[in-house]
Image: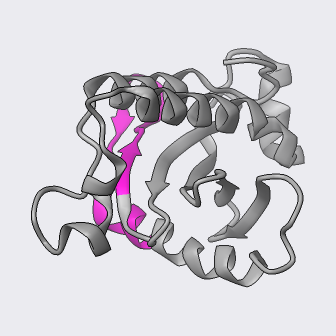
Amino acid sequence: MGSRSPSIAAIGIIGRHNNPLHTALFPATGVGHEQQRDRLEYSFMLNSSLDIFEARMPSKTVGHDFGLLHTLDERLALYGWLTNTGVKLVIVVDMEGRTAPTPEAGKTAILGLRSSDLAPAFQALQTAYVGLLRNPFYIPDEHDPQATKGSGSLAITSTHFINEVDRIGKTWHSGMAVI
């Protein structure tokens, strides 16, 4: 069996009122197969990170990187980022998510990730979100559960944004400087 390297298992975009705006799942890849991930299981994982954001909020005054939020087991870990608008970005990393392209890349699963390894992914996600906000046809209040009072979808439906999130999740690997 070849060595494995970390990959992004899921990306969650969570609104300022803790409402899910977008969830993207990425299959674990192996030799000749892909293993699909359970959407409900990952929704629970993303929801579990909200308490950690709230607990760290009073002491978090500088920077947006919340780093490692928590680990679920030796394989899955959740990392967080907070935007200026209060939107939370959460990345679930699968430490054995894909076959390592090189032997050096496989060593990351053994040694672990640093929070800075995910900084390019979070920066790319934030850039994609800012691009979404700059779209004159996107109205953030339509996705606010307090403003909509049950009318309309709370999820982001912009295909450009969804495709960009998918691109980030599929291309990220440990050691990337820019996505």
* Residue found farthest to the left: 151
**Relative to 55, is 59 on the left or the right?**
right
Nearest the eye: 63 or 168: 63
**Relative to 110, is 101 on the left or the right?**
left
Inspect this view and state whether residue 37 appears.
no
- Tally of numbered discs: 0
In the image, residue 153 above or below residue 167: below
Residue range highlighted in magenta? 21-44
Q: Quadrant of residue 76?
A: bottom right
**Relative to 27, is 104 on the left or the right?**
right
Report the colour scheme: one colour
x and y percent of residue 111 in the render?
Answer: 89, 46
> Which residue corresponds to the image point at 74% horizontal and 17% vertical from the top-left?
178
Q: Is residue 77 magenta?
A: no
x and y percent of residue 4 in the render?
Answer: 67, 34
**Relative to 3, is 47 on the left or the right?**
left
Q: Quadrant of residue 15?
A: bottom left
> Which residue corresponds to the image point at 37% horizontal and 68% vertical from the top-left?
19
Inspect this view and state whether residue 139 appears.
yes
x and y percent of residue 161 in the render?
Answer: 38, 29
> Which residue corresponds to the image point at 35% horizontal and 54% vertical from the top-left?
21
Quarter of the picture containing the N terminus is top right
Quarter of the picture containing the C terminus is top right
> Which residue corresponds to the image point at 77% horizontal and 42% vertical from the top-left?
109
Nearest the eye: 103 or 51: 51
Nearest the eye: 44 or 59: 59
x and y percent of residue 48 in the render?
Answer: 53, 77
In the image, residue 111 above or below residue 123: below
